Image: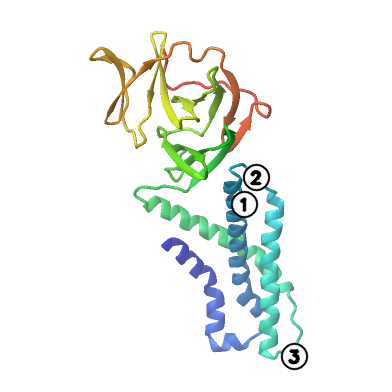
Amino acid sequence: MLADIIAWLIILLPAVVAFAVPKLRKNNGNWMIALKTVPLGVVALFAADKIITDLHRWRCEQMLANVEFNYAVKAALAFGFALLVIIISGWVINKKSGAEHKFNPFPSILLFFPALIAVAILLSLISVLTMFNAKNYQGEWRSVYLPRENGDGFVFEQQSIHPFLAEYNYRLRFVRNRKSTRQQLFVNYGGRTHFNLYRLKDGRLLFRDKDWDYIVDTAKQQVFRLEIVNGKSYIAAVPNEDINSWSSPYEKDGKFVMDMGNHSVTAAEVTGILDGMVYYGCITYRFYPASEKVEKKITKTRERK
């Protein structure tokens, strides 16, 4: 937040100086007006972009679906609003100053585009410096809306946890009667997001990425970790918390368990659960149903026996 405030103060500095210094304030030639109005236009552009983006995300959340979005229209609206702010503010400044010459917006529009490039570079530098200084970097949670299950909303959420590397927190969100229940998944410590989804014969879903296999019961809002040992399949409920350690299934006190974090969770044998599973789609930066993207084989980082 502090970095954003500093950035916008720097962006508005030329206009502030132009209005604060009496000699510059009285100078209302078209190029000086450009110096006063272009920073306002830059701020208007970024503000319009954020408002449009937030409205789109709000609409997706209301629908619990990925609403199609035309980015060309978004860009046109944001740039149009910015240029409108520049032209109107320039006309007002010219009129209030009582200048005899007619206001010409061309210098302001011409200066706007190189100023925008400079601002983009400035914001990138500030963002990089901020991320380098962050002790525990965490980006914002991004939602990928999956097809509804039994009429209930179903959302995959991811959060970047490194400023440059592909490392993410993952969780699932079940929405029933507009109430959300979240279930944390294991952290991805390296690699772009790619899950294959499969429909099992019992109706549940298999989520498979390079590290883990999850059985997701959307009706009961439960998530299980699936492991295969010596040809036998076992599942155990995933604790809803940060998990920094784990074990394969092993026998303890006459039953099989899986260690996950501070918990030893009872594991149930489910050999054959994957028989007859059908490819359902995949998750990258959004959900692709099987009809849109063919199955891509997942190479596991750990060998399954």
Q: Secondary structure at mark 1?
A: helix
- Is 92 placed above or below 85 here? below
Q: Residue at x 65, y 45 (%)?
A: 67
| 119 sits to left or right of 89 | left
Check disc 2 and give the amino acid type.
Val
Q: Residue 134 got which mark?
A: none
Q: Mark 1 — residue?
A: 56
The image shows residue 45 at horizontal and vertical percentages of 62, 63
Check disc 1 and give the amino acid type.
His
| 55 sits to left or right of 175 | right
Considering only order in the chain, which callout, 2 or 3, is on the residue closer to the N terminus? Answer: 2
Check disc 3 and give the amino acid type.
Glu
Crowd band around label 2 with a 10 angstrom C-alpha radius: few (<14), some (14–19), many (20+): few
Considering only order in the chain, which callout, 1 or 2, is on the residue closer to the N terminus? Answer: 1
Q: Residue at x 69, y 91 (%)?
A: 98
Q: CA distance from mark 3 to mark 2?
A: 51 Å
Q: Between tags 1 and 3, which lies in front?
A: 1
Q: Mark 2 — residue?
A: 67
Quarter assignment of residue 288: top right
Q: Residue at x 48, y 32 (%)?
A: 191
Q: Mark 3 — residue?
A: 100
Q: Nearer the viewer, residue 116 or 89?
A: 89
Where's the C terminus, which quadrant?
top left
